[in-house]
Amino acid sequence: MESITETKTGESTTAPKPLSMRFLEVRNRTYEICKPLKTEDYPVQPVTDVSPPKWHLAHTTWFFETFALKEFDPNYQEFDPTFGFHFNSYYNNVGERVQRSNRGAMTRPETARIFEYRKYVNEKLIDLLSTARNSKNLYDVIELGLQHEMQHQELLLTDIKYILGHQPFFPCYRVDSYIDRQLADVNFDWVKIESGLKPIGYEGDGFFFDNEKGSHQVYLEEFSIANRPITFGEYIEFIESGGYQDFNLWHSDAWEFIDQNGIVAPLFVHKIDGEWQRYTLSGLQKIKGDEILVHVSYYEAAAFAQWKGFRLPTEFEWEVASEKFNWGQCWEWTNSAYLPYPRFAKAPGALGEYNGKFMINQMVLRGASGATAPGHSRKTYRNFFHPHLQWQFAGIRLAK
Amino acid sequence: MESITETKTGESTTAPKPLSMRFLEVRNRTYEICKPLKTEDYPVQPVTDVSPPKWHLAHTTWFFETFALKEFDPNYQEFDPTFGFHFNSYYNNVGERVQRSNRGAMTRPETARIFEYRKYVNEKLIDLLSTARNSKNLYDVIELGLQHEMQHQELLLTDIKYILGHQPFFPCYRVDSYIDRQLADVNFDWVKIESGLKPIGYEGDGFFFDNEKGSHQVYLEEFSIANRPITFGEYIEFIESGGYQDFNLWHSDAWEFIDQNGIVAPLFVHKIDGEWQRYTLSGLQKIKGDEILVHVSYYEAAAFAQWKGFRLPTEFEWEVASEKFNWGQCWEWTNSAYLPYPRFAKAPGALGEYNGKFMINQMVLRGASGATAPGHSRKTYRNFFHPHLQWQFAGIRLAK
Amino acid sequence: MESITETKTGESTTAPKPLSMRFLEVRNRTYEICKPLKTEDYPVQPVTDVSPPKWHLAHTTWFFETFALKEFDPNYQEFDPTFGFHFNSYYNNVGERVQRSNRGAMTRPETARIFEYRKYVNEKLIDLLSTARNSKNLYDVIELGLQHEMQHQELLLTDIKYILGHQPFFPCYRVDSYIDRQLADVNFDWVKIESGLKPIGYEGDGFFFDNEKGSHQVYLEEFSIANRPITFGEYIEFIESGGYQDFNLWHSDAWEFIDQNGIVAPLFVHKIDGEWQRYTLSGLQKIKGDEILVHVSYYEAAAFAQWKGFRLPTEFEWEVASEKFNWGQCWEWTNSAYLPYPRFAKAPGALGEYNGKFMINQMVLRGASGATAPGHSRKTYRNFFHPHLQWQFAGIRLAK
Amino acid sequence: MESITETKTGESTTAPKPLSMRFLEVRNRTYEICKPLKTEDYPVQPVTDVSPPKWHLAHTTWFFETFALKEFDPNYQEFDPTFGFHFNSYYNNVGERVQRSNRGAMTRPETARIFEYRKYVNEKLIDLLSTARNSKNLYDVIELGLQHEMQHQELLLTDIKYILGHQPFFPCYRVDSYIDRQLADVNFDWVKIESGLKPIGYEGDGFFFDNEKGSHQVYLEEFSIANRPITFGEYIEFIESGGYQDFNLWHSDAWEFIDQNGIVAPLFVHKIDGEWQRYTLSGLQKIKGDEILVHVSYYEAAAFAQWKGFRLPTEFEWEVASEKFNWGQCWEWTNSAYLPYPRFAKAPGALGEYNGKFMINQMVLRGASGATAPGHSRKTYRNFFHPHLQWQFAGIRLAK
């Protein structure tokens, strides 16, 4: 895994490589992520939130086929006319269906055929790039496709971890993976930020998503923010002090949720024979106190902050302060709901479904995790999930 | 109903009446609201979100008994030692229970006994007020209790409407009620607000809740906001244009929700024999086009705004602009999540459960409705509900 | 309650009273059963299986109005044209509905009006009987209506007990009720029955239901059956020996059901401060060891029998042996599924819905309980419920 | 598939082959059934009732390892100590688990390793058989294991059909499979049986299950039974006459079930472009009128019989009449609940869980289907499923 994620901490600078080279690099990284899998790992969907690895492989490819090849290559021959039906379900523009199915039941087309699909689309796209020069629109679509694939690379790792981590005997993904075993590298301290009007949102020439666009001003009062995320050691103190049993620490919805679902620890954390252990991508391991906490929900993050007597930062506080601390070890829950920035407008057509329709019931996470693709993180990036979900590489940074 | 809510439009000014007189007035208004009910209407709970009228009557009384009489009157004799168990469930500080129950199964104590309870507590509290002069803390608790009861008066009307509106033959509550039959009084127009730093939150000497406290600044870009809420006529155009069938108009969670629950119109709206009708507190009636829309969810409000090509205002935009338009005909969904203001802190003890624990998964509504108690509305008031709920007197004001 | 059920043990002999007298007696007994209720007890439906007392009162009356008065009295004026809509839901022959409702939401028409309805129908029916002499068909319908009402009397008591027994403070129904406090009157012993072809099913001139009709032969091997039902004392031994924790004693479906629903004792049984108590119609009481067990499901009955090393009798064994023991203290679960006898055929029309459509997924109970109406029990009577239900006055008789 | 199931119609006679040869034949048939599968088909579990093919392969092997090799071969070296944990879940005798899982999440151990497991256990068992001569107990366990594997062969085919039949493009399993495409071979007629005491249950020297043991007498009245099962053509008449919309034809539980689950046809039957088609193991095909109906639930079978004016036979009628007609084209729902025969007793220990714990809530099917293993069918065989399940190769034979 080293070669895939190694240097990723904080803001990254993307070297101006040729697009075709970047295309192949990104596409190949998806392939590398899958190398340790067995064929049986590809089609399963243990819970609704987890997509089968096979589906990620095909869906990211379908994106390039649909929005680049079909749009810009008049001679393009579709790889398989049934694949659109299989893998376009991401967008609601679906046609008629003979019967209802779900991703986890899709054992066919088999994985080998998906890899052929990837190879075919890669070759056709490289061909197209070599002829269709200076086509700004094509380059934009490919760039969007690469960002889309990088997003799916993180989800793919998340889903792989979920699938393997729910096998009875906790198989190892890679012995040398440090994606979810990052260490706290500084002593806990507070960083103070003065009040004032602050610029928020992406400005620059690089790639950005529509949800982070629209630089605008936000007035912030003076605040302090932690110089590093919370560690497993700190969180286990919370567990052992009875944090999951004290309703005063939890939001009303959170209390109901953890009660009904029997949540008593972060995902993948087990107390076995009296000892705290957790499943990592390198297998089941004893928890080390200075490892950065991952796999908590917003509910847990907020309860922990309440217990500590502090709070979570807003996404605006986080963005403003982010140049004063290191980040990138885990996604960090903020106390901001995922809502549109001023002047946000949905793009027309299918691509307009990308972000806007998710702007309700979700909380913003900032930063990046050990599973985030290199070059895919920036301080204005707005990640978002429903507040009860634990299955991301998400942790906690405190503010006051 | 006239006597109860008559002049309520927009900000109200409360005359400086003696506290004991205000106490009796507010308590009596609860009684007036219940007058049209039959004994059988009091104990039922048709859905979880609806509390039995009996429970509202007892719970608001329990509040005064627990936090005023027991705290400030050393000689106070509890009305019935089992009532604490029955009606303190609002707060999580519950003692042991012999077995699980729910509000809707509680046919005992019977309603007549609850009215005795109200009378007893009223008398004891008036006695206490006549002796315990200048007790600032007592006055504060009574004021909070009155505000609490006024909140429950609106919920009581909401729940009464739900209970009666789900009887097969739609019984009338009061023939002359205009709570949910308010008319648009101006032609639609836009009000423009300049950009700038704006003060937000309650400042002054009157009563306020902890969630609206903490005057702070918010930077707003220039925006325009509608001079009145949407009417039923405008909303029915949305329905008839196929709004409930076009997924592009809806948030992802919203689309799933209306699909699974078969939502095709606001609550209480029925198409009967080809004609749009709705249940009002005066019975089933043909819909008039210029009546102010009520009983939509946030999901519906957002989809309607999307269809119109506009958006919902944020709660900050609403608060800043509220002096330039009339309000008070319906609660107005904003596009702001219910989150703490800067410097918000939960009060210690049981009263600290009042607001903070609900600050997740809910959207803010501003304004007031025809069911809001007189003197209970102000421009900084933050109401909040989950985005799927239709059962409030909630409507839509557009912004752009 | 004494006057209502006193002599009921085993087979009863019905004196040849005039039909009009019997009609008034049965109708009046329903009224007597309701006397201890408060108005608030009438409209509630705490769980789906429990019908509101109000509904029983109206539905049994609707039966006479629909099938006797409307059919046989050409001048009959309907009491209220909406009542058919409200109370005919027992049969699937429903017309169009403006919207879906459920029995527990029906606070209107109020209970006082239902009692007027009963009075009105009683008077009209007595008038009809005094004029329409020798109408065999009318007499048959009235007889069926009386049997129907007697069935509902038992359900009414069952539902009243459920409603009151789920109040937090366990109100007493009648201090002197022995319906659910019957004592074992003999020492446990076995009754032996020889093998052979045995006649099964009702034969005679009295009333019977279509499901028990059709005398036919069943071959039985030699068996023994207990001379009395199981007591609470015997069942508590089962609980205390860990019966609810040993999967080997339970059917597969049963084990899943008690696990998912947290069943650890019969309905209404609580261990309070280390002591076994149960809710009876006379309030919460310490359990006495020689009281006859009631409120177990078939699942519990079968597990208990397995634990004892015996089994439940079939309904045929029960019927054949019933003349050799006393019965009538509790309904007795048999190991027979509720299926049609040879030559069973559904009656045409609405009355054909009476029994046949329930002949799947239910187990037969034989006997009668303390809540069964006098004159409503006979050895061929086939009662039936789903095997997971505890809310009947049902117990256990062993066989081997 | 021809070679596997070809001659199976009605009662079969098993040639007295050496046990080791039979062992290899049965084990090899499982292998043959899996040949057309892709690796991705093995681990998935689209619904709870369907087990992953991989699981069938391992579980049947685990049976021989646990009850034969470990019991009778003192030198046996377990193939993999984790496999017991993975695959013994059939019986409730489970040990502690680090966390909850389900069969469909089990991507590991991979399928290739399961095939190694089968090979290893086969070899060890053949070795054991070659040395441990005349061990009646060992032979009995192996015979039970073979019968167990034959049962799973049918379930395996059922589950394979479910998995493939729920792929969006209906892949073919085998082009030449006639398992679910059997033709009616005679014209419909009635077979009449005289009344009398009839012997029921298995008697003889062959293999039988404990649930069919215990020859006993049952008295039957005269009846007639159809000489062949219902065809698809006959069933489609029922559909097209509105059978799924007429509540009078359905049991109460059935009507609720088909309503809530949107059942409007047998499993795998689709109306596509106005034409009745169905998924068979040879792919999607137009329905032929004279094909034997399969994949109906008991609920559907009973409703069809009601519509025809007839009924389903009891399992006793079926057994007595079975020598007068051909059977083996489909499992045939009877109107008998799955209950113990006289003198049935659960075997002690784990093997006692085999049948007894399922004797509630299920209906008996008699006969055999095109998917039943050769030599695994006999007239006394009692198959059983919950009445709502469609996924078996189950059809209808009428009686009157």
Image (cartoon, coloured by chain):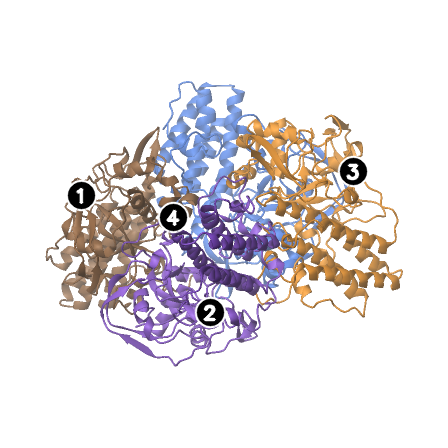
Chain colours: A brown, B purple, C orange, D blue
Secondary structure under badge 3?
loop
- Chain at tag 2: B
In the displayed structure, does residue A30 sit left or right of residue C294?
A: left
Residue type beneath disc 4:
Ala
Numbered disc in front, either 4 or 2: 2
Determine the residue located farthest toward the bottom in the rendered image.
Answer: B187
The residue singled out by tag 4 in the image is: A254
Q: Assess disc 2: are there few (<14), some (14-19) or many (≥20) residues with their C-alpha within 10 Å of its C-alpha.
A: many
- Of the numbered discs 1 and 4, the one sitting upstream in the chain is 1
Verify CB contact (< 8 Å) between mark 4 and mark 2. no
Q: Residue at x 21, y 58 (%)?
A: A220
Label number found at residue B370: 2
Verify CB contact (< 8 Å) between mark 1 and mark 3. no
Label number found at residue A189: 1
Residue type beneath disc 2:
Gly
Q: Quadrant of residue D382?
A: top right
Residue type beneath disc 1:
Asp
Q: Are marks 2 and 1 on the same chain?
A: no
Q: Residue at x 81, y 70 (%)?
A: C75
Q: Is residue C241 above or below residue A303?
A: above
In the displayed structure, does residue B100 sit left or right of residue D339?
A: left
Residue D172 versus residue B358: which sits nearer the camera? B358
Residue type beneath disc 3:
Thr
Q: Assess disc 1: are there few (<14), some (14-19) or many (≥20) residues with their C-alpha within 10 Å of its C-alpha.
A: few
- Chain at tag 4: A
Residue A364 versus residue B262: which sits nearer the camera? A364
Q: Are marks 4 and 2 on the same chain?
A: no
Real-space Cα distance between discs 4 and 2?
Answer: 32 Å
Label number found at residue C187: none
Numbered disc in front, either 3 or 4: 4
Secondary structure under badge 2?
loop
